[in-house]
């Protein structure tokens, strides 16, 4: 989709979606003017702090998500955000609890969290997951459904909750999942290596993912 077509199509799709339901629209323009023609974004996802949000190309953002760029959010190439996901760069719940009625209107609330967040290339965020402010998610990561992610997640990790209400933990490695397909389709090796790196391609093919 060209930038001009995006300029007219996306607002129209949002208006029509009131009557027709959620729609996925091709094309995304960042606050700096950069246009991502292959990114696909739902008309029914809530975006906050657009001035601090950067979406790279080939990103998919599904329905009913909350994407918060108020304190800096980078979503790198090829990331998939499914449905009912919150990706945050601020948090106010501690401030509200300790300040009560004094919270409203205070320019510097006690306990207010402002941290930039990053989701690495070709990562997958499962439904109903929450990415806490300041999280740094590596590339090629799978965040399983109903996960709460805080802090750093290494490249190619599979993370998920081990018990209800517990923060997500590393459970596996996506290069293990990719091995069979990469062995079966050598024509994809160059494409995989382009974003993952040649060493990670080698580890996936040879079963040395954790080395």
Image (cartoon, rainbow, N blue to C red):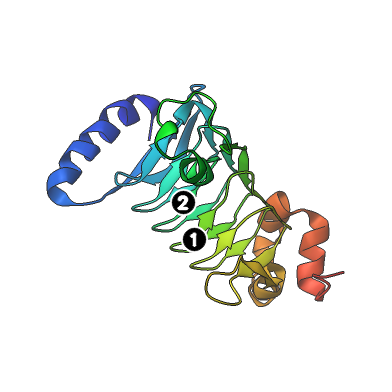
Q: Residue furthest right?
A: 211
Q: Position of residue 136 (x, y in %)?
A: 67, 48
Residue name at image x 49 percent, y 63 percent: 126
Q: Quadrant of the C terminus?
A: bottom right
Q: Residues at badges 1 and 2 in contact (C-beta under 8 Å)?
A: yes
Residue name at image x 53 percent, y 69 percent: 165
Q: Distance between the residues labelled 1 and 2?
A: 7 Å
Compared across the picture, whether 131 is left or right of 22 comes to right
Residue name at image x 45 percent, y 30 percent: 50
Label of residue 129 in the image: 1
Indicate the secondary structure of the residue bearing disc 2: strand
Q: Where is residue 198 in the image (x, y as percent from the top left)?
A: 80, 56
Q: Which of marks 1 and 2 is nearer the N terminus?
A: 2
Residue name at image x 60 percent, y 58 percent: 149
Q: Where is residue 112 in the image (x, y as percent from the top left)?
A: 56, 37
Compared across the picture, whether 138 is left or right of 21 comes to right
Compared across the picture, whether 112 is left or right of 138 comes to left
Closer to us: 197 or 153: 153
Q: Quadrant of the N terminus?
A: top left
Indicate the secondary structure of the residue bearing disc 1: loop
Compared across the picture, whether 149 is left or right of 44 comes to right
Which quadrant of the figure has residue 172? bottom right
Closer to us: 204 or 89: 89
Label of residue 86 in the image: 2
Label of residue 150 in the image: none
Closer to us: 211 or 179: 211
Disc 1 residue crowd, few under 14, some 14–19, many 20+, Cα 10 Å: many
Q: Where is residue 134 in the image (x, y as percent from the top left)?
A: 64, 44
Disc 2 residue crowd, few under 14, some 14–19, many 20+, Cα 10 Å: many
Compared with 7, 130 (above or below) is below
């Amino acid at each position: 989709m060209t930038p001009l077509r995006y300029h007219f199509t996306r607002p129209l799709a949002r208006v029509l979606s009131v009557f027709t339901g959620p729609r996925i629209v091709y094309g995304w323009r960042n606050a700096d003017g950069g246009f991502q023609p292959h990114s696909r974004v739902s008309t029914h996802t809530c975006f906050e702090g657009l001035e601090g949000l950067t979406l790279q190309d080939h990103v998919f953002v599904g329905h009913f998500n909350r994407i918060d760029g108020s304190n800096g959010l980078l979503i790198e190439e090829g990331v998939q955000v499914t449905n009912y996901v919150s990706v945050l760069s601020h948090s106010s719940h501690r401030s509200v609890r300790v300040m009560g009625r004094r919270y409203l209107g205070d320019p510097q609330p006690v306990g207010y969290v402002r941290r930039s967040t990053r989701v690495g290339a070709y990562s997958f965020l499962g439904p109903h997951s929450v990415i806490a402010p300041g999280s740094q998610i590596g590339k090629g990561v799978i965040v399983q459904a109903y996960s709460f992610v805080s802090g750093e997640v290494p490249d190619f990790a599979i993370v998920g909750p081990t018990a209800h209400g517990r923060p997500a933990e590393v459970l596996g490695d996506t290069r293990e999942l990719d091995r069979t397909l990469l062995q079966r389709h050598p024509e994809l090796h160059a494409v995989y290596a382009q974003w993952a790196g040649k060493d990670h391609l080698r580890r996936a093919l040879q079963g040395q993912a954790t080395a």
